[in-house]
Image (tube, rainbow, N blue to C red):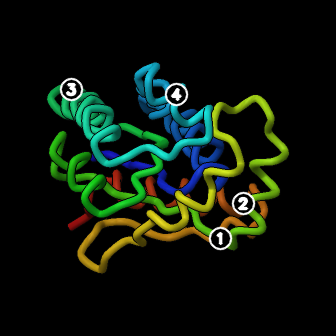
Amino acid sequence: MHFVFMGVSGSGKTTVAEHVAERLELPFAEADVFHPEANIRKMSAGTPLTDEDRRPWLRELASWIGEHDALGETTVMACSALKREYRDLLREGAPDVHFLHMHGPAEVIWERIEARPDHFMPPALLRSQLETLERLDPDEAGQEFDVRADLETLNSGALLYVEDHIRPAVP
């Protein structure tokens, strides 16, 4: 089973995903690390990525999921996964992928992005990410988390969701 913490830049997906992975001692991947240099240069220059830019990156992430699935390992990943089509590509790595969508008002996320100057993604790209974002469809395994909650609430809610899904079912 695999858990992808999704959402726009600044939504807190990496912070919460790292907490869950650490607490449960699960392999963790930060999707930004997988971006090719060309994607990082493009985003750093304030140019949104296209679907064509994202596909090879998403396929590499799906491969990472698939490699761990083949080993029988549960994983945690932080990845924007903004569109259904992107999430479908990630599911090609393994069928049992759950998406934990970190979402909230644009103003809240904007403030967070502005507070972290060390990230390559400039705040100006938030608008394009919000325009691209497609919330989870009813048939997609996952849950939404409102980022206006405090970090402790987000961490405990996400941890509970993951634990509930990786525990063996009791007959």
Q: Amino acid at mark 2?
A: Ile
Judging depth in this view, the residue of 32 and 96 nearest the camera is: 32
Q: Which residue is mark 3?
A: 67
Quadrant hosting residue 159: bottom right
Binning the other alpha carbons within 10 Å of mark 1 as few (below 14), some (14 to 19) or many (20 upward) gives some
Q: CA distance from mark 1 to mark 3?
A: 32 Å
Q: Secondary structure at mark 3?
A: helix
Q: Which mark is residue 109?
A: 2
Does residue 121 sit above or below 136 in this rendering? above
Counting residues from the start of the chain, the first of labels 1 and 2 encountered is 1
Q: CA distance from mark 1 to mark 4?
A: 25 Å
Q: Amino acid at mark 3?
A: Glu
Counting residues from the start of the chain, the first of labels 1 and 4 encountered is 4
Q: CA distance from mark 1 to mark 2?
A: 7 Å
Instruction: Look at discs 3 and 4 and give the one toward the viewer.
Output: 4
Instruction: Look at discs 2 and 3 and give the one toward the viewer.
Output: 2
Counting residues from the start of the chain, the first of labels 2 and 4 encountered is 4
Q: Residue at x 34, y 53 (%)?
A: 167
Q: Quarter holding the C terminus? A: bottom left
Q: Position of residue 68 (x, y in %)?
A: 25, 29
Q: Is residue 54 visible?
A: yes
Q: Residue at x 54, y 59 (%)?
A: 128
Q: Which residue is mark 1?
A: 104
Q: Which mark is residue 40?
A: 4
Binning the other alpha carbons within 10 Å of mark 3 as few (below 14), some (14 to 19) or many (20 upward) gives some
Q: Secondary structure at mark 1?
A: loop
Q: Position of residue 169 (x, y in %)?
A: 26, 61
Counting residues from the start of the chain, the first of labels 3 and 4 encountered is 4
Q: Amino acid at mark 1?
A: Gly
Judging depth in this view, the residue of 160 and 115 nearest the camera is: 115
